[in-house]
């Protein structure tokens, strides 16, 4: 929704007290916005601090989910919930580096804790989509971050190589292991992904 000049002027004419009341009402209805303002205005913790906490949370929660749900049918929905927490972290802190590093951590931890029973196909397709998305986001970052992300990508690649079915599925969906070095990610990875999905893959 775009705000007209008249609407903006009407808001600016509010008294300070009226503006304060309006802001508080809006923040009560938007939890993410309230957390983001708190983070930006008074939170003593930095985005790095929050990212470190998220890394611990991801490892603990994936391990917990794996112990609780032995079937992929119940495992995947909970992995999605953990992914949603990463999204929330990014919305609050605008941590673009963390969006990639934390997602790759989630992928590697998920692969380390695969359920013993059930068909893993939907889970693998979900993870492959996450990998493609992480590669696209990596290309949008400053190359100075590539070195730091190299270890994350390498860990995911190693996990894929240990899983024959996932390795074959990755190749079938156009994902090459040499791309797991940030410097080797194709510049047009977003267009590559669009073409792959246009062929009906990654579903």
Image (tube, grey):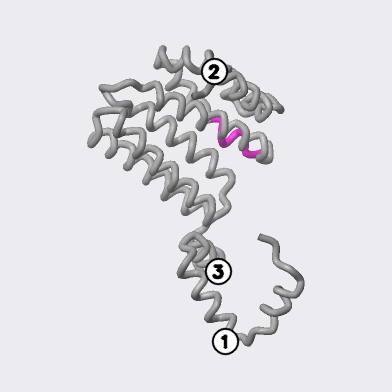
Nearer to us of marks 1 and 3 is: 1
In primary-sequence order, the first of circles 1 and 2 is 1
Q: Marks 1 and 2: CB-CB under 8 Å?
A: no
Task: Please provide percent x and percent y for residue 40.
Answer: 56, 64
Task: Please provide percent x and percent y for residue 194.
Answer: 64, 27
Front one among 88 and 7 = 7
Q: Which residues are magenta?
A: 144-150
- As helix, strand or loop, the secondary structure at mark 2 comes to loop
Front one among 168 and 113 = 168
Q: Residue at x 70, y 66 (%)?
A: 3
In this view of the protein, can residue 184 be seen by the observer? no
Q: Residue at x 69, y 84 (%)?
A: 13
- Compute the Cα span from label 3 to label 2: 44 Å
User: Quadrant of the image for the N terminus?
Assistant: bottom right
Disc 3 crowd, CA 10 A, few/some/many (<14, 14-19, 20+):
few
Numbered disc total: 3
- Compute the Cα span from label 1 to label 3: 20 Å
Q: Is residue 157 left or right of residue 117?
A: right
Task: Please provide percent x and percent y for residue 124.
Answer: 43, 24
Nearer to us of marks 3 and 2 is: 2
Question: Is 16 above or below relative to 118?
Answer: below
Question: Is 28 above or below relative to 51?
Answer: below
Q: Magenta stretch containing residue 147, yes or no? A: yes
In primary-sequence order, the first of circles 3 and 2 is 3
Mark number, residue 41: 3
Mark number, residue 196: none
Q: Magenta stretch containing residue 177, yes or no? A: no
Task: Please provide percent x and percent y for residue 150.
Answer: 56, 30
Mark number, residue 17: 1
Disc 2 crowd, CA 10 A, few/some/many (<14, 14-19, 20+):
some
Q: In this figure, which residue is indicated by the disc labeled 2?
A: 173
């Amino acid at each position: 929704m775009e705000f007209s000049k008249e609407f903006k002027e009407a808001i600016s004419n509010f008294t300070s007290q009226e503006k304060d009341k309006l802001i508080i009402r809006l923040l009560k209805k938007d939890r993410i916005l309230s957390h983001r303002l708190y983070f930006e205005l008074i939170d003593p913790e930095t985005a790095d601090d929050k990212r470190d906490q998220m890394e611990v949370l991801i490892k603990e929660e994936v391990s917990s989910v794996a112990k609780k749900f032995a079937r992929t049918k119940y495992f995947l929905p909970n992995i999605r919930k953990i992914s949603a927490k990463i999204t929330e972290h990014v919305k609050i802190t605008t941590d673009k580096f963390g969006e990639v590093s934390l997602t790759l951590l989630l992928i590697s931890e998920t692969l380390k804790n695969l359920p013993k029973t059930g068909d893993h196909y939907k889970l693998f397709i979900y993870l492959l989509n996450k990998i493609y998305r992480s590669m696209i986001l990596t290309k949008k970052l400053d190359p100075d971050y590539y070195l730091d992300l190299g270890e994350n990508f390498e860990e995911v690649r190693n996990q894929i190589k240990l899983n024959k079915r996932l390795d074959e599925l990755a190749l079938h969906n156009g994902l090459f292991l040499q791309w797991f070095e940030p410097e080797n990610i194709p510049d047009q990875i977003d267009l590559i992904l669009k073409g792959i999905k246009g062929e009906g893959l990654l579903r």
